[in-house]
Image: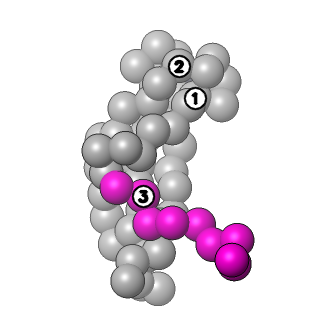
Amino acid sequence: MPDEKQHPDMENFKKKCAQCGAQMRLFGIEGDSSGSNIYSFECPKCGHVDAESVPTR
Ligand SMILES: [Zn+2]
């Protein structure tokens, strides 16, 4: 089996804050020019923001 990252289901897409470890909150999704979706996350505790690029089919 190839070690392929599965397309995450939005309901199950959880991300932890790199700074404090809290469950981050998804606040935005936008497409980029290469056909991926950029999931934007914000930490409710410390305000750290992070983004995850997710390829779409
Ligand atoms: Zn945090």
Say what secondary structure mark 2 lies in: loop
In the picture of the structure, the residue carrying the numbered disc 3 is 8
In the image, taking residue 37 as reference, residue 20 lies left or right, namely right
Amino acid tagged 1: Cys
In this rendering, which labeled residue sits more in front, label 3 or label 2?
3
Q: Which residue is farthest front?
A: 1
Amino acid tagged 3: Pro
Q: How many marks?
A: 3
Q: Which residues are magenta?
A: 1-9
47 or 14: nearer the viewer: 14
Amino acid tagged 2: Ala
In the picture of the structure, the residue carrying the numbered disc 1 is 17
Q: CA distance from mark 3 to mark 2?
A: 19 Å
Numbered tag placed on residue 50 in the rendering: none
Residue at 37% x, 44% y is: 12
Q: CA distance from mark 3 to mark 1?
A: 18 Å
